[in-house]
Amino acid sequence: MSTAPPNDAKGVNRGVAPVTESRGVNRGVAPVTESRGVNRGVAPVTYGTGNRPPRGDYGRARSDYTCEQDHARYTAADHDTYRRLHARQLQQLPGLACEAFITAVEHLGPPDQIPRFDAVSEKLMRATGWQIVSVPGLIPEEAFFALLAERRFPVTDWIRKPEEFDYVVEPDVFHDLFGHVPLLFVPAFADYMQAYGAGGLKASRLDACELLARLYWYTVEFGLIDTPQGLRAYGAGILSSAGELRHSVRSGEPRRVGFDLQRIMRSRYRIDSYQAGYFVIDSFDQLFEATAPDFTPVYQAVRERITREGEIEAGAVLSGEREFSPLA
Ligand code: PHE
Ligand code: FE
């Protein structure tokens, strides 16, 4: 990977895996490495050049990378980890998470155990036509895009070990489910996610996944929204993190500017610490509409601008940009 390998990642919990800036896309999906012969099924996925073996058991996966959740395999300790993570996050949400998320988190069901994906899917299907599907862990970006384009959200089925309570290097069931699934109950956001998947398949053909990944990072994972009550978080990386929720909304340290598609595509991001900069949307409708046009000329324009002016460092604010103040 072009930046810090997972082992070097700082112990700051964002509840989300490090992703390579150069190749990582979306939820931390990394390129497929050569099979090490441990899995008979689909090839396992690891991060960039890291030599840590993949965490999940890819031998169980179908060719589209989905697998059975096997709920009976979770131990009492696994359920307890989920319950404690859920409790820690839930009590922090008021005043920091967007209202739509707080309302929708209820749909995950009672937090006393790791939810059954089928039960959540049933509700989600009725609400927005989305389903969640179980995966062994990180999956290749094309497989990920294909699932999103079909309104199927991949959720990692394993949960972190108790000693990883504050920091886990790959997304686990808590990040994927608690962080990502609630907003799939919100129609405009649900439509955005599907459009992102379809756009990802196109970006793969245009060799533009790196630019598109930045959009995912700064919206789906680390997005903020300006509401009548003030700034709130909607990104899954923030909402599943013990510390970043407060940092992103209330700290005076990071910089916050308004959502701007091309600006985001020119902006680098941090994978090993809290974000230095965030982008703020006005509404999910704005997000959907701003990303609806064909990105083919957008990628071209962004590439040209990067060639002329370079990329923008994480946390930079350019002259003329309006900054959002942290929530008082
Ligand atoms: N409109 C984008 C395209 O043509 C697709 C997209 C939508 C990408 C939403 C990301 C988010 O590529
Ligand atoms: Fe994620």
Image: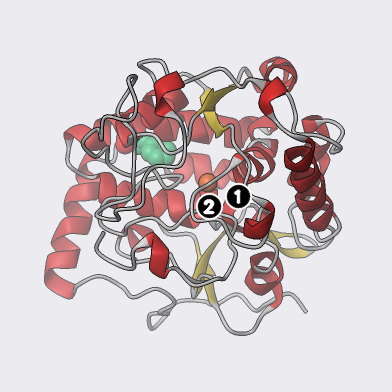
Residue at the spot x=41%, y=27% of the render?
58
Say what secondary structure mark 2 lies in: helix
**Residue 308 appearing in the image:** yes
277 on left or right of 94: left
Say what secondary structure mark 1 lies in: helix
Residue 236 badge: 1
Residue 221 badge: 2
Q: Is residue 324 above or below residue 6?
A: below
Residue 246 badge: none
Would the CB of label 1 be found within 8 Å of ligand 2? Answer: yes
Would the CB of label 2 be found within 8 Å of ligand 2? Answer: yes
Pick the front one: 287 or 118: 118
112 on left or right of 203: right
Residue at the spot x=64%, y=30% of the render?
187
Amino acid marked by disc 2: Glu
Q: Position of residue 255 (x, y in %)?
A: 53, 78
Q: Position of residue 90 (x, y in %)?
A: 82, 52
Amino acid marked by disc 1: Ala
Q: Residues within 10 Å of mark 2 (few under 14, many from 20)?
A: many
Q: Are marks 1 and 2 in contact (CB under 8 Å)?
A: yes
Please identify the quarter of the rendering in which residue 12 is found.
bottom right
Q: Is residue 228 above or below residue 187?
A: below
